[in-house]
Image (tube, rainbow, N blue to C red):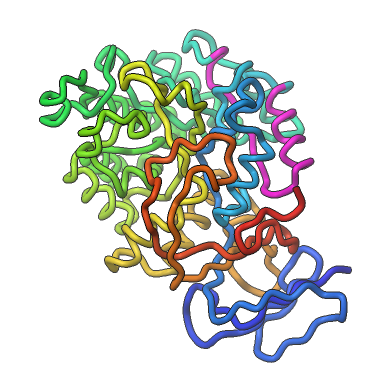
C-alpha cells in the first residue's frame, strides 16, 4: 500500500485549505490535520489550488513515424508538466493509425511510459484518404479500446462517407471528431481570409470553409442519431452553428484551442511561420466570440491541438511551413489569462472545460472525476500566483515551435498525480 499526502490545498480554489490523503490509486480522506504513514510521499501545497487532472482530446504525439519531432515519451512528459493525466493521440502518424496494430501500439507505449494515459485516436478512413472507412470496430475492440475516431489534419469531406462513419460510430458507441474544412475552399490557403492576409499577400482560408462542414455534419449527425465532435472551432459563425444545433437536440460537441482564445491574425505581420496553424488564427472578433462561447458552454471544452514540428518544417517561408503549434505546457496558463483573469470562468469552470467535459465527451470513467473520497486520484496542483516566461528550448517536447516564446503567463502547474503516483513536480516529469 502506498500513500501520498497533499497538504494545505484548496480544491477548486474554494474554502479554507485542507489536506488530501491518497491511498494507492484513490482519494482516501479529505480534511484538516491529516497524517500518513512514515514512508508516505508528502507534497506541501501552501494554499495552492487542486483540480482534477486535465484531459486533452486533441494531441499530436507523432509516434510512429516522426520521432524526430515528438515521441509518446516526450509528449507524455509535456502533458504531465501541463497538468494532464490523459491525452488523445491523433491518428495522422506515419503509418496512419487506421488499424488495430497501430492503435494498440500507441496505447501500450503510453502505458509503458506511464506519465499520462495515452488514448489512441483511430482514423475514420484508410490512410486519411477519405475514400474507404477504416476498421473502426476492430480498433474499438482492441487493447487500446479506441473510443474516438478522426482524420484530423484533413476533413472527411465526402458527405456519404461521413454519414456512414456516423452511422457506424453510433452502433459502436464511439465518437467521430471532425476537422471541419471544405477543401475546395482552402486550396493553397495559408492564413485567415481577411484584411490582414490581403494586405500581406497571403492566400486566404475563409470562415465558410469551416462553417459549411460544421452545418453539414450537424445535419448528418441528426439524421444518423449519432454524436459528432467539432475539432478546434475557430470562428464566430461556428459558435452560432453549434449553438443552433444544440438547440435542435442534435448531439454535437465542440472544442477550442488555447491559441485561438489568445492570438489573432495580427500575428501575421512578421511572416513568422510559428504562427501558421490549421485552422488559422482568426480576427479579434472571432477570439471574443470563442471566449464567450466557452464561458457559456456552447463550446464544451479546451483541447490543445499540440502539434510539434521539426525546425526545418517551420524555419522556412510561410507558405511552405507545416501548420501547428506546441500547446500542452502552456494551456492552463493561457486559460487563466484569457478566461479566469477576465472573470469568464472560475476555477470550477476551469475544471469543467479542461477535465470534466472532455472526459465525459469520450466516456472516460476514471478521469475528470470530482475531488472526493473514493474517487480516482488523478489530480493537478496549481500555483495561481506564479508567473513564468515561456522558453521553447526549456519545454519537454523535442520540438520548440511555440508562438508564445518570451511571453510571461500567470499560474503554473506545480504537481500532477496519476492514480496516486506523482508524474510531474516542480517543473520536472517524474520517472523518465
Q: Nearer the viewer, residue 68 or 253?
A: 68
Image quadrant in which you'd find residue 425: bottom right
Q: Is residue 136 rendered to the left or right of residue 297?
A: right
Is 385 located above or below residue 249 in the figure?
below
Mark yes or no: residue 363 visible. Answer: no
The percent position of residue 375, horizontal first and vertical second, equals: 68, 67
**For residue 163, above or below residue 384:** above
Horizontal relation, residue 331 to residue 90: left or right: left
Q: Residue at x 74, y 72 (%)?
A: 22
| Quadrant of the frame with the N terminus | bottom right
- In this view, the residue farthest toward the bottom is 33
Is residue 180 visible to us here?
yes
Quadrant position of residue 182: top left
Total number of numbered discs in the rendering: 0
Q: Residue at x 54, y 75 (%)?
A: 11
Q: Is residue 107 magenta?
A: yes
Residue interval drawn in magenta? 102-127
> Which percent across, then down, holds residue 155?
40, 21
Going 27% across and 48% down the picture, which residue do you hit? 290
> Which residue is the extreme one toward the top?
131
For residue 59: magenta? no
Q: Position of residue 418 (x, y in %)?
A: 69, 57
- Image location of residue 117, percent across then percent down: 68, 46
Tell me where residue 98 sits by quadrant. top right
Please state which of residues 272 and 5 is positioned toward the viewer in this rendering: 272
Amino acid at each position: 500500500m502506498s500513500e501520498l499526502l497533499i497538504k494545505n490545498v484548496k480544491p477548486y480554489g474554494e474554502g479554507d485549505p485542507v489536506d488530501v490523503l491518497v491511498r494507492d490509486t484513490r482519494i482516501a480522506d479529505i480534511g484538516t490535520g491529516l497524517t500518513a504513514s512514515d514512508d508516505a510521499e508528502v507534497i506541501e501545497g501552501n494554499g495552492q489550488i487542486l483540480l482534477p487532472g486535465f484531459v486533452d482530446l486533441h494531441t499530436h504525439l507523432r509516434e510512429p513515424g516522426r520521432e524526430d519531432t515528438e515521441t509518446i515519451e516526450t509528449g507524455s512528459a509535456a502533458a504531465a508538466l501541463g497538468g494532464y493525466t490523459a491525452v488523445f493521440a491523433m491518428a495522422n502518424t506515419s503509418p496512419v493509425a487506421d488499424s488495430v496494430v497501430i492503435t494498440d501500439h500507441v496505447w501500450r507505449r503510453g502505458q509503458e511510459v506511464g506519465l499520462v494515459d495515452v488514448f489512441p485516436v483511430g482514423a475514420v478512413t484508410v490512410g486519411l484518404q477519405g475514400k474507404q472507412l477504416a476498421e473502426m470496430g476492430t480498433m474499438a475492440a482492441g487493447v487500446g479500446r479506441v473510443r474516438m475516431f478522426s482524420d484530423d489534419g484533413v476533413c472527411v469531406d465526402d458527405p456519404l462517407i461521413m454519414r456512414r462513419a456516423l452511422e457506424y460510430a453510433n452502433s459502436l458507441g464511439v465518437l467521430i471528431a471532425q476537422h471541419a474544412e471544405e477543401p475546395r475552399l482552402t486550396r493553397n490557403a495559408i492564413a485567415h481570409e481577411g484584411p490582414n492576409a490581403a494586405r500581406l499577400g497571403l492566400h486566404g482560408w475563409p470562415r465558410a470553409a469551416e462553417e459549411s462542414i460544421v452545418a453539414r455534419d450537424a445535419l448528418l449527425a441528426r439524421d444518423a442519431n449519432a454524436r459528432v465532435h467539432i475539432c478546434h472551432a475557430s470562428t464566430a459563425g461556428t459558435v452560432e452553428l453549434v449553438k443552433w444545433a444544440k438547440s435542435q437536440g442534435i448531439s454535437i460537441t465542440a472544442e477550442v484551442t488555447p491559441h485561438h482564445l489568445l492570438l489573432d491574425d495580427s500575428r501575421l505581420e512578421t511572416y513568422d511561420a510559428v504562427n501558421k496553424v490549421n485552422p488559422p488564427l482568426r480576427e479579434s472578433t472571432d477570439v471574443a466570440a470563442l471566449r464567450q462561447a466557452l464561458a457559456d458552454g456552447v463550446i464544451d471544452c479546451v483541447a490543445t491541438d499540440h502539434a510539434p514540428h521539426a525546425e526545418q518544417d517551420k524555419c522556412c517561408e510561410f507558405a511552405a511551413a507545416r501548420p501547428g503549434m506546441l500547446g500542452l505546457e502552456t494551456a492552463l496558463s493561457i486559460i487563466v489569462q484569457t478566461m479566469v483573469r477576465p472573470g469568464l470562468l472560475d476555477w470550477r469552470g476551469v475544471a469543467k472545460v479542461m477535465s470534466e467535459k472532455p472526459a465525459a465527451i469520450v466516456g472516460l470513467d476514471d478521469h475528470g472525476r470530482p475531488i472526493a473520497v473514493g474517487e480516482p486520484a488523478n489530480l493537478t496542483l496549481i500555483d495561481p500566483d506564479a508567473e513564468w516566461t515561456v522558453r521553447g528550448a526549456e519545454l519537454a517536447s523535442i520540438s520548440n515551435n511555440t508562438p508564445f516564446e518570451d511571453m510571461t503567463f500567470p499560474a503554473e502547474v506545480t504537481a500532477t498525480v496519476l492514480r496516486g503516483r506523482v508524474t510531474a513536480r516542480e517543473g520536472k516529469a517524474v520517472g523518465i
